[in-house]
Amino acid sequence: MSDPHDYARRVRARPYGPEEFTAGGVTCWFHGPFAVLTLHGDGTSLTIRAAADDGTSTCAALAAMLTAAGEGRPAALPEPHHLVCEGRPPLPAPELLRLTVQPTPDGTSLTATLADCRVAAALSTSDTRLLAERLHRWASATAR
């Protein structure tokens, strides 16, 4: 999925979107069978990509994790390795080790952990719910 030609082929095969929006410290972009999330933390950012047609329920699990966060519960994505981190060529894409949400006094912290760094994006409760709802809607549309 990290090959640019494969990416373009899959987008052309399922042409819906694009839609882009920002929810707190996360910019989300839906394009074809991909949901791309960029987490903006303390001076750092990380872009991760989920594919609706990867044969797993990663998109639904991501939406469920954010739904839990919107309800004030901590949660973790069960299989974060199904998400692809965007690498900076010529470096290989780093592996996502953990993706978690944790309630905070101001909303939610969405944290991505890689071997060499950690990026935490802040979301208000309403931003968390918006992101969860849009991911649910996108995952439902891609399942058709």
Image: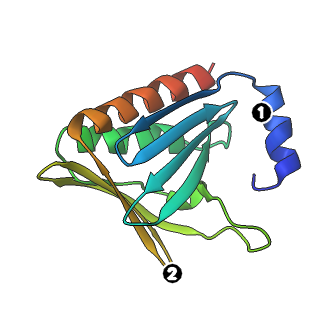
**Can you say whether 24 is above or below 130 in the image?**
below
- Front position in the image: 12 or 59: 12
Tag shown at residue 47: none
Q: Position of residue 99 (x, y in %)?
A: 42, 59
- Say which element carries label 1: helix
> What is the quadrant of residue 83 in the picture?
bottom right
Q: Residue at x 49, y 57 (%)?
A: 79
Mark 1 and mark 2 lie on one chain; the one further toward the N terminus is 1
Residue type at the position of mark 1? Val
Q: Residue at x 68, y 65 (%)?
A: 87
- In this view of the protein, can residue 85 be seen by the observer? yes
- Say which element carries label 2: loop
Q: Position of residue 10 (x, y in %)?
A: 80, 36
- Front position in the image: 89 or 98: 89
The reply to whether dot 1 and dot 2 touch (C-beta < 8 Å) is no
Q: Is residue 45 left or right of residue 70?
A: right
**Can you say whether 24 is above or below 18 in the image?**
below
Q: Label 1, on which residue?
A: 11
- In this view of the protein, can residue 143 be seen by the observer? no
Q: Is residue 69 left or right of residue 16?
A: left
Q: Position of residue 69 (x, y in %)?
A: 25, 44
Q: Residues within 10 Å of mark 1 (few under 14, many from 20)?
A: some
Task: Locate the C terminus by quadrant.
Answer: top right
Q: Label 2, on which residue?
A: 116
> What is the quadrant of residue 31 in the picture?
top right
Q: Residue at x 39, y 61 (%)?
A: 41
Q: Residue furthest front?
A: 43
> What is the quadrant of residue 48 in the picture?
bottom right
Q: Residues within 10 Å of mark 2 (few under 14, many from 20)?
A: few
Cα–Cα span, label 1 and label 2: 31 Å
